[in-house]
Image (cartoon, grey):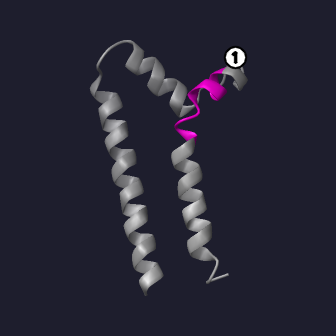
Amino acid sequence: LPSLMPGIVSAALLAFTISFDDYVITSMVAGVDSETLPMVLYAIARRGANPVVNAISTVIVFGLGLLIIVSERLRKA
């Protein structure tokens, strides 16, 4: 398992990143009462420039960057 961990973590990060690109599929497949993050962000952005979208995007980018840095340091250790 320790030698598989970098692959597992990178696959999880890639799946998490790609999931934000699936708005079209989500909007077609989602039920009436479900609200996923891509759908909420699209609804907020459609109404106009909103600092909430910028804040969420910043948190996501920095969070993913932090996960990448941590995984690289664990890989080199």
CA neighbours of label 1 inside 10 A, class few (<14), some (14 to 19), many (20+)? few
Q: Is residue 40 left or right of residue 28?
A: left
Q: Quadrant of residue 18?
A: top right
Q: Quadrant of the C terminus?
A: bottom left
Q: Work out which residue is located at the far bottom of the displayed protein and give it.
A: 77
Does 18 lie within the magenta span?
A: no
* Placement of 57 over or under 1, stated as above or below: above
Magenta extent: 19-27
Seen at 45% across and 71% down, the residue is 71
Q: Quadrant of the N terminus?
A: bottom right
Seen at 52% across and 33% down, the residue is 37
Q: Quadrant of residue 31?
A: top right
* Placement of 6 over or under 60, stated as above or below: below
The image shows residue 13 at horizontal and vertical percentages of: 53, 57
Seen at 35% across and 46% down, the residue is 59
The image shows residue 64 at horizontal and vertical percentages of: 41, 55
Q: Work out which residue is located at the far top of the displayed protein and give it.
A: 47
The image shows residue 47 at horizontal and vertical percentages of: 37, 12
Residue pointed to by mark 1: 32
Amino acid carrying label 1: it is Val
